[in-house]
Amino acid sequence: MPAQASPKFRRRKAERPGEIVEAALAVFAEKGFAAARLDEIAARAGVSKGALYLYFATKEDLFRAVVEQAIAPNVQMVRAMIAAHPGPIRDLLRLVPERIAAIAAALPVGGVIKMVIGEAGNFPELARVWHDRLVAHALGGLSEAIAAAQARGEVKSGDPRTYALQLIAPVLIGVIWDETFAPVGAEPFDVVQIARQHVEAMLSGMLVEEARG
């Protein structure tokens, strides 16, 4: 009678897809998509290249898994927070950009953002996945909350989607700065502080007087 796999071995096998995704996130952030090699990702994950192919058929599949498993859950939590927020809008607007900045600071997403921007021309699927699973959710949820606040009379007239982009964009610029220029000697930015300072400046311009608080 063949020996059964030990519980430790079974747990190790079950953990492999997550370990591969974690390794892929690091390699994509460091090397970019075109230069990322599946054998390097496999080595970092502690598996053979053949074992990697058991879970992910292509590098594109692996990138989608990185977005879905390593990053999207954080964005989904932000969207849920937006949907559950009872108001007023000023409190939510102070929370959301800072939460996005904290995610960017905690995960190596700066290199992946730079990769998507730089390689989208040759690999449009990267931009499509990033937009559909991340950007559209964060921007859409914030736009809906701003539109609802406009209907309540808290926010001045203007395109809600543009307001949402204005709130988030400086954080993304800070992330890209730190990823691109800090490694060559430029002083880095604290992206969480960027979020806090920028939101206060935005609130004074977009809220009606009674809603500023």
Image (cartoon, rainbow, N blue to C red):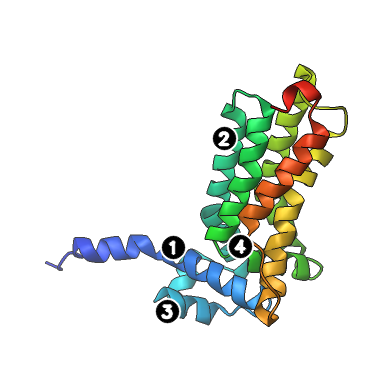
Is 132 located above or below residue 34 in the figure? above
Q: Is residue 155 above or below residue 172?
A: above
Q: On the rendered image, what quadrant is the N terminus found in? A: bottom left
Q: Quadrant of residue 59?
A: bottom right
Q: Earlier in the sequence, mark 2 or mark 1?
A: 1
Q: CA distance from mark 2 to mark 1?
A: 26 Å
CB atoms at circles 1 and 4 under 8 Å apart? no
Residue 82, labelled with which disc? Answer: none
Label 1: which residue? 17
Between 52 and 84, the one nearer to me in the picture: 84
Which label is found at residue 80? 2
| Whole-percent x, y for residue 184 in the image | 69, 81
Mark 2 falls on what kind of element? helix
Identify the mark nearer the N-term, 3 or 2: 3
Q: Is residue 73 left or right of residue 212?
A: left
Residue 48: give its label: 3
Q: Residue at x 60, y 59 (%)?
A: 64
Identify the residue shown where x is 55% and y is 77%.
38
| Whether residue 111 can be seen here | yes
